[in-house]
Amino acid sequence: MAYEFSKIEVLIADSQPMVVDLIRATMRLLGVPPENLHSFYDGASALTSFKKVNHDLIIVDWELQDIKGLEFIKAIRSNPVNPYVPVIFTTALTTAKRVGEARDSGITEFLAKPFTARTLAERIEVIVERPRQFVLAPDYRGPDRRRKTGADYTGPERRGAQKD
């Protein structure tokens, strides 16, 4: 990755200090200065920071001390301050239901725990190199979940034509 990360602001919200330390260390290796890393173990403090600082990236866990990560993401996506910020969602419980709930809440990328610094850096690289268009719909607010658009697409919905 050959990007300039020295000016980005990163919000980290995870109830596990070791995970926060890993994320902070990875971000430092990418060039983010320590004063631009805003770390929290609870959702309320993280939301307060979100409302005060214009973050460029958010990394949040499913299980925060006071609120669920899904509630946190929904609060971000519904807030007019910075609803378009990329969000990497982390969790150790990666059932299909949970991944779907996270995706439907408006996350940008999903990262299963345990993860390595390399895996985190790869997710950030995806966000930087292939940013997704943001969707504002009545029942969804977040990045476009389609990874690619095919030339052979003919229907109004991504998974096929509507059924009568």
Image (tube, rainbow, N blue to C red):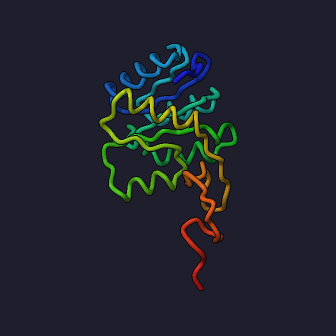
Name, please, the residue furthest toward the bottom: 164
Name, please, the residue furthest toward the front: 151
Quarter in which the C terminus is drawn: bottom right
From what the image shows, is residue 156 above or below residue 21?
Answer: below
Q: Position of residue 147 (x, y in %)?
A: 54, 51
At 61% from the left and 61% from the top, the residue drawn is 139
Return the residue nearer the eye: 133 or 73.
Answer: 133
Return the residue nearer the eye: 100 or 133.
Answer: 133
Return the residue nearer the eye: 23 or 153.
Answer: 153
Q: Position of residue 63 (x, y in %)?
A: 37, 42
At 57% from the left and 53% from the top, the residue drawn is 148
From what the image shows, is residue 35 above or below residue 152?
Answer: above
Number of disc labels: 0
From what the image shows, is residue 156 above or below residue 41?
Answer: below
Q: Position of residue 110 (x, y in %)?
A: 44, 44
Q: Position of residue 155 (x, y in %)?
A: 63, 71
- 127 with respect to 24 (left or right): right
From what the image shows, is residue 53 above or below residue 114?
Answer: above
Residue 23, by quadrant, is top left
- 111 with respect to 50 (left or right): left
